[in-house]
Image (spheres, rainbow, N blue to C red):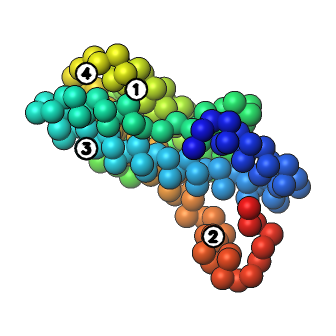
Amino acid sequence: MSLAVAISAIKFLFERYSDAKDKKLLSLHLLGTLNRELAFNSELSGEAEKIHIKTPYVAKQLIASMKTDAFDAISALGITLSNLFEDIDAAWSTSTSGYRRLEIGAYHSRLKNVKSKPVLIERSYHRLKIMIVYANLGVTKSGDSYQYLSALLIASRIATTAVNSIYPFNSSQQLASGNDRFNF
């Protein structure tokens, strides 16, 4: 999906969900979209982490193939991640991350000052974009760089999965019910 298409889709959603109740649903929808993008990227990052020593070219291609369309579209429209978490518990810490790799070990010290899910997600995308730049330049990064990216993406995926689990319905349930209010 191109950034222009993503921006158009989010504009449409933003206009469609006009009242406060609908704004919360929009936030949940956008967080669900971020969750799917993070899930895709965390899978690719995990694969790159496994193979970066034996096949660095493939690892770099996996990193270069990662997506940031959802994040970029939300950012381009001036929607902050803090706004998306406005009515949702946004607190986060390494000890409550649900991800053992962050609760102990090297990444704990790097992330101990991160106190919210929006900051965690921003940091994840920042690191991801840096890794994409290096991959596009053909620069081979250390194993620690791959591990750190994987840890960030998994933690962000967990953070948005917890939010996404309170989404009142999924698209198949909504379509089966005949409620076309949320069809696009």
> Label 2 near label 3: C-beta < 8 Å?
no
Dot 4 crowding, Cα within 10 Å, few <14, some 14–19, many 20+: some
Which one is in front, 7 or 168?
A: 7
Circle nearer the N terminus (4, 2): 4
> Label 3 near label 4: C-beta < 8 Å?
no
Dot 1 crowding, Cα within 10 Å, few <14, some 14–19, many 20+: many
Circle nearer the N terminus (1, 2): 1
Looking at the picture, which amino acid does disc 2 mark?
Answer: Ser
Residue 63 pos. (x, y %): 35, 33
Q: Which residue is mark 1?
A: 132
Q: Nearer the viewer, mark 4 or mark 1?
A: 1
- How far apart are labels 1 and 3 at the CA level? 15 Å
Dot 3 crowding, Cα within 10 Å, few <14, some 14–19, many 20+: some
Q: Is residue 68 above or below residue 137?
A: below
Q: What secondary structure is found at the residue carrying circle 4?
A: loop
Residue 42 pos. (x, y %): 37, 45
Looking at the picture, which amino acid does disc 3 mark?
Answer: Glu
- How far apart are labels 4 and 3 at the CA level? 15 Å
Quarter occupied by residue 106: top left
> Label 1 near label 4: C-beta < 8 Å?
no
Q: What secondary structure is found at the residue carrying circle 1?
A: helix
Q: Which residue is mark 2?
A: 171
Circle nearer the N terminus (4, 1): 1
Q: Which residue is mark 4?
A: 141
Dot 2 crowding, Cα within 10 Å, few <14, some 14–19, many 20+: few
Q: Which residue is mark 3?
A: 47
